[in-house]
Image: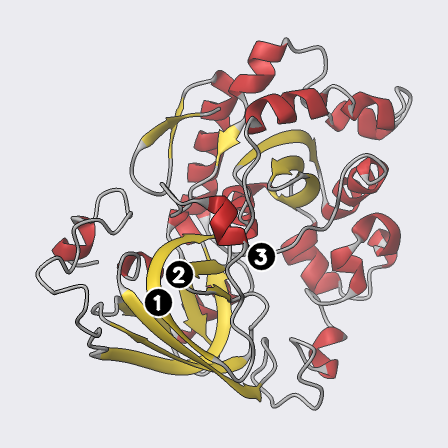
Amino acid sequence: MTERQRALGDFGGEGRNRSKSSSDPPEYNYSIEGHIGYFSWYRGTPSLSFIDSDATLNCDSLVGESLRVTLHEERVCGNCGEKLSKPKYSVCYDCKQRPPFTQCIKTPGTDCKNADCPFPDYKRDACAHTYVVYLVTKADVKVGISRSDRRLQRWAEQGASHAIVVAETPNRKSAGLIEEAFSDRFETQSSSSWYEPRTSPVEDLVEATRTVPEYIPDDSRLHACLTLNDLDEDVVADRVVSIPHRATGIDHARGVNRPELEVGDNGEGTILGVRGSVILTDSFALNLKKRQGYRTTIETTAELAVEVEDKLCCLLRFVGGLWDGVAQKLQSERQLKDSNDGTHYSGGDGRSERSG
């Protein structure tokens, strides 16, 4: 990241391009084109990878700048890069037969065979690890699961505003069973589109956790996995984590009404912020999760902060950071300990925030 980008501070974009008249058309001096890959919040930084390139685009460099996007109709598999016979799907048929795109990964509580897993290598490397069950706030309260060492990244990629861990389990299957038990009370799916945050997310999560024990019988082995039993509300509130974003000072109600860029269209506007996988401008929204695999041309007035990584690193980022490494794991464990202790947590914008 350049010194000019670091100087942006709160990522609101204020004060940039002031030397130009507002009537002057923007000069799109920088561009990048490729098939949209994985949008990541690795270590609190929003970045976009491309399927046919080793480059990742640091989206922090774009906030406050003018942007022109052309979303072409050509689409390839979001995993292997092969041309799709049915563009309405994000991955090809062959890739859908293997994890992480199989149903056992999406709904492990009902579809994971565990001991009889047909993918033993994937189970060893990705499923037989500590998992957490969590509640997050978006427009509604949602339940989900994640590997413990990448939960912060997972919450940011979902676009959640706040989150709290309600259970910790020894593997994906157990986490899925608890998630399934909670599904009668909380949503398990949520839209990836821009949303208006709840006015009291911490209080809403504290209230939601009160009902959690009701769904796990006392005599169940899963009951021992719950993490908030018999805790005072103040203690629970201190465990709520505020999730990094780049959406400070945005009128979210107006943002919800921004039309999403459709396939075959092009849009032009000033970038207001980034939350989850959505880039919001003053005229349209670009939902990168929905458009995975589509050939896209991005033109901007900003000098693109493109980092070129080796192919292995790009692959690791693309599959969601399953192999984030010891440094990421230690960082996540430290942040969880801080949230458990009610200490401060540094958000992705560099400012220290209270865990609530």
The reply to whether residue 308 is in sight is no
Q: Which residue is mark 3?
A: 193
Q: Which residue is mark 1?
A: 269
Q: Residue at 68% x, 23% y: name it.
A: 227
> Mark 1: which amino acid?
Gly
Answer with the quarter of the image where residue 196 lies: top right
> Disc 2 or 1, which lies upstream in sequence?
1
> Mark 3: which amino acid?
Ser
Q: Position of residue 336 (x, y in %)?
A: 50, 30
Q: Residue at 69% x, 52% y: name it.
A: 127
Mark 1 vs 3: CB contact within 8 A: no
Q: Residue at 40% x, 56% y: name it.
A: 46
Q: Nearer the viewer, residue 192 or 234?
A: 192
Mark 2 vs 1: CB contact within 8 A: yes
Q: Position of residue 67 (x, y in %)?
A: 32, 70
> Disc 3 or 2, which lies upstream in sequence?
3
Q: Which residue is mark 2?
A: 281
| Separation (CA) of disc 3 from disc 2 | 13 Å
Q: Is residue 306 left or right of residue 89?
A: left
Q: Is residue 132 above or below residue 257?
A: above
Q: Quadrant of the N terminus?
A: bottom left
Mark 3 vs 2: CB contact within 8 A: no
Q: Is residue 163 left or right of residue 3?
A: right
Q: Is residue 236 left or right of residue 21?
A: right
Q: Is residue 276 above or below residue 53?
A: above
> Disc 1 or 3, which lies upstream in sequence?
3
Q: Position of residue 239 (x, y in %)?
A: 54, 22
Q: Position of residue 334 (x, y in %)?
A: 44, 31
Q: Is residue 40 above or below residue 7?
A: below
User: Can you tell which mark lies on residue 334?
Assistant: none
